[in-house]
Amino acid sequence: MSSARDHLGRPVVAVTGIGLVTPLGIGVAENWAALTAGRSGIRRITRFPTAHMKTTIAGQVDLPEEAGRATPLSSPERVERMGTIAAEEALAAAGLGGGRFPGPLFLGMPPVEVEWPQRLDLARRAQGNTGGAVRYPDLIAAAEGRQDLFEGFLYGGIAERMADRFGTEGAPISLTTACATGASSIQLGIEAIQRGEATAALCIGAEGSVQPEALIRFSLLSALSTRNEEPARASRPFDKAREGFVMSEGAAALVLESLEGARARGAEVLGLVLGAGERADSFHRTRSNPDGGAIIGAMRAAIADAGLAPAEIDYVNAHGTGTPENDKMETLGMLAVFGDARPPPISSNKSMIGHTLSAAGAVEAAFSLLTIRHGVIPPTINHETPDPAIPLDVVPNVAREARVRRVLSNSFGFGGQNVCLVLGTVG
């Protein structure tokens, strides 16, 4: 794209930096090599005991500072650490590390709450004070003066500390839109630049919720795979034998700039974010409306926002969780948007990294940009038994070389929150 304005006269949004942390590794190079090799990052959980749990596998990120710790880092600590690692890589790639960042921070992250290790510690302290049974007021009394708990589990605290670290402008925004969170953080950055409110934005999606309570909650929703004996084969998007997603964690960061601004400072443009579409329904806390209206609407809105026709999309980076419901609904959306005759190829990164929840939309946007740059479509691994109800080219098991200029990246969240992004090439 030679013009610095899009079809609606808005500034074209460029990506000048990418950072990645997933169970496949730390850094863009390590992740891309593993992803295109079809390698799984799913394994047995080692961070906490899993006896009596239905699901004992996940996508874990091993952080160096966790070695030798008696208790694992809390979820907010993991979000902050992985988000920081991804942001540092993205800023270095953009040539913006080490100084003030010329735009706002948008951090997509999960809700936070005091976790079991901290609650048990408070209970022990309270029992020491009372010498007997512990009541809720006793826990409150034991927590008095615990600034570490307040700061560690304050939802907006992570973004505040990251804003100080990277010198971003304005008030940092923390947001959560379920499994669409990472894509929502990018959408906010796009719109800020398009409206002329910013010339750059640091957009991060981060997730650190591989911990007992979150695992149990998703298990109670019957959403998780229980293929515990075969961790690497457990995540099976679009396969007939799929039976649930695999919980995971990680982070991705994108540095967004106006194309005009990026060119003016001589930055390398890694790709473009051409459009975003958002639709929601309130049908069910986990299921989509059977008519697929919000999913179809989000896909169509993103393509239209990019000034494209469906036939101009070369590849779709699927939400592709591997649950029977999601894959069925995403197929319905694909056929409605692209028609039955020739939908573009679609594949799911979650077959290898699992579902990184709040980070997923950002991680998959990053992988979409890498697909465009390298001309390789990552596979959907563990695709052994095709589902007759899913008549799509899911790029089964082996990566595929292809000329890809435009990608639609889908993120569909619990509660009916859906965000789709269109990523494209320069020129």
Image (cartoon, rainbow, N blue to C red):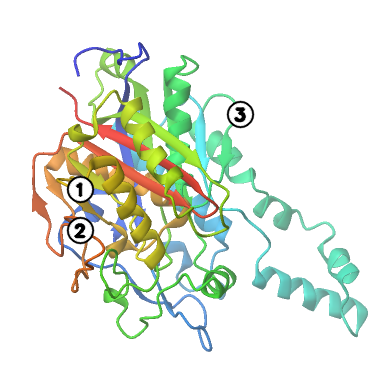
SS at mark 3?
A: loop
User: Which of the two discs, 1 and 3, sits closer to the camera?
Assistant: 1
Q: Position of residue 46 (x, y in %)?
A: 44, 78
User: Which of the two discs, 3 and 2, sits closer to the camera?
Assistant: 2
Between marks 1 and 3, how big is the CA–CA gap?
Answer: 46 Å
Amino acid under disc 1 = Asp
In terms of depth relative to the viewer, which is nearer, 323 or 270? 323
Classify mark 2: residues with Cα within 10 Å, few (<14), some (14-19) or many (20+). some
Q: Position of residue 55 (x, y in %)?
A: 45, 79
SS at mark 2?
A: loop
Classify mark 1: residues with Cα within 10 Å, few (<14), some (14-19) or many (20+). few
Q: Is residue 330 above or below residue 261?
A: below
Q: Are marks 3 and 2 in contact (CB under 8 Å)?
A: no
Q: Which of the marked residues, 3 or 2, is nearer the chain's N terminus?
A: 3
SS at mark 1?
A: loop
Q: Is residue 397 left or right of residue 353?
A: left
Residue at the extreme bottom: 52
Residue 391 tag number: 2
Q: State which quarter of the image contains the N terminus.
A: top left
Q: Position of residue 245 (x, y in %)?
A: 39, 67
Q: Disc 1 designates what residue?
A: 340
Q: Is residue 140 above or below residue 5?
A: below
Q: Is residue 224 left or right of residue 130?
A: left
> Residue at the location (51% across, 49% down)?
416
Q: State which quarter of the image contains the C terminus.
A: top left
Q: Is residue 68 above or below residue 397?
A: below
In terms of depth relative to the viewer, which is nearer, 394 or 132? 394
Q: Disc 3 designates what residue?
A: 171
Q: Are marks 2 and 1 in contact (CB under 8 Å)?
A: yes
